[in-house]
Image (cartoon, grey):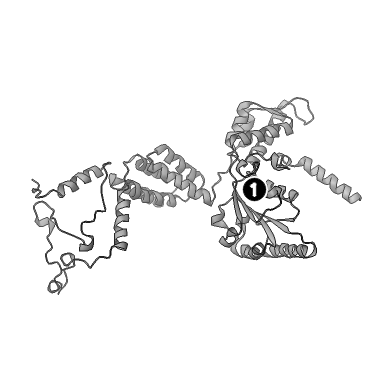
Amino acid sequence: MPEDLFAVAAEESLAGQAPLADRLRPRTIDEIVGQDDLLGPGRPLRVLIEADRLSSVILWGPPGTGKTTLARLIAHTTAKAFEALSAVSATVKDVREVAARARQRLGERGQGTILFLDEVHRFNKAQQDALLPSVEQGLLVLVGATTENPYFEVNPPLLSRSTLFRLHPLDADATRTLVERGLAAEGAAAEPDAVDHLVTRTAGDGRHVLTSLEVAVALARRRVGGADGDEALPVVTLGDAEAALGTKALRYGRDDHYDVVSAFIKSIRGSDPDAGLWWLAVMLEAGEDPRFIARRLVILASEDVGMADPHALVVADAAARAVEFVGLPEAQLNLAHAVVHLATAPKSNRLTVALGRARADVRERPAGEVPAPLRDAHYRGAASLGHGEGYEYPHDDPRGWVAQEHRPPEVAGRRYYEPSVHGHESEIAARMARLSEPDRPAQQ
């Protein structure tokens, strides 16, 4: 009995010393802020939790969105046994021991088991394979939490047996609610601009905003006189908020890598140099491989600018070479140079469309061999085979061009490249139109 009393006292003492984010952790679904699409009245995840009918799920979302909080709520509401592991430290042996205990429970008293696996993306393939049979048989109900895109990081068989719930960063209203709760818990107040700063700079991360608020309150309390027992009400100022926030590492996981580069490409394609520079800055600050950025610019130069500005490919290629030759940090200027050039260049995707049409014809329209006039006639015996016979050399014509067919008859006359009216392609269109005029006179 004394040991139990000491244990309770220890827990109470730890609770009083716990970080603000942990002290304010919701104990009921109604206390959770944000995620209304999943946890609002009648919404799917809420219904499953309240009915204790949860099957295996993976909770996917950025830090501070409530994944661990949800797992703890499930632990308090379920009639099943609840076990927790962290993929950072757990081994295959740990997984097998949990499965063995679950089998024993089920056999002895018919009780199921929920396994909460935090950072599930940190499990390697062998560890996930060890878990799969127990999930597949229903022996374990898996609740996995991950900040990474599970489609990239979780084995397809395990993912297919789980329901994926995506949690989003908290919106401004939800974050503001957390700040208000934190101020009440700390017995403090805050200036409106300090609250605004905390809300906007924490990017929807609930844990981050509460941790920053706790530091800001400590700074405010120290300024008004010291000890926690003082009657003076600490008021968090904008300066306190700025000092508490300091610098925060940019979240940039594998999923962000693909999303950010998508936004980067679409910004340049949309002729928005400022947005292109913004996403370039995001990637550079996150430590993205500059060679990857350069490769994407080289591709975009042909895919989205093309012949509307033939120099775009030269600029993009020069930036890519500068990355190899100069390296960061100086080469960031060369990348920015290419971004601005490509974003402000006239746009045309006619090269992409033309190649797609040509490849479709190659696949879908069986064509004969290379026509005899176009075959190689330079080797001995080629003339006897009829190679080159009938070919007209364009440079022999005073116009520098001769009307002749250069494709097999099955695809003769098919049009692939149709220049746009943008940039240099307008000149190409005019030139092609002149070439197609009947009886075009020689150039003077």
From the viewer's perspective, tell me whether residue 305 is left or right of residue 86. Answer: left
Q: Position of residue 77 (x, y in %)?
A: 74, 49
User: Which amino acid type is shown beneath numbered disc 1?
Assistant: Leu
Q: Position of residue 41 (x, y in %)?
A: 66, 41
From the viewer's perspective, tell me whether residue 10 is left or right of residue 27. Answer: right
Image height of 261 relative to 213, above or below? below
In the depicted view, which residue is nearer to us: 228 or 370? 370
In the depicted view, which residue is nearer to us: 104 or 429? 104
What residue is at 39 percent from the left and 38 percent from the top? 272
Name the image quarter holding the C terminus.
top left
- Quarter where residue 171 is shown: top right
Q: Name the residue under label 1.
A: 45
Image height of 207 relative to 238, above or below? below
Number of numbered labels in the structure image: 1
In the depicted view, which residue is nearer to us: 315 or 255? 255
What residue is at 64 percent from the left and 27 percent from the top? 237
What residue is at 15 percent from the left and 72 percent from the top? 382
Judge the density around disc 1: few (<14), some (14-19), many (≥20) Cα neighbours within 10 Å.
many
What residue is at 54 percent from the left and 55 percent from the top? 151
Q: Position of residue 47 (x, y in %)?
A: 67, 47
Image height of 172 relative to 352, above or below? above
The answer to whether one can see residue 43 in this image is yes
In the depicted view, which residue is nearer to us: 394 or 441? 441
The answer to whether one can see residue 89 in this image is no
- At numbered mark 1, what does the secondary structure look like: helix, strand or loop? helix
Q: Position of residue 31 (x, y in %)?
A: 70, 39
Name the outermost residue toward the top. 232
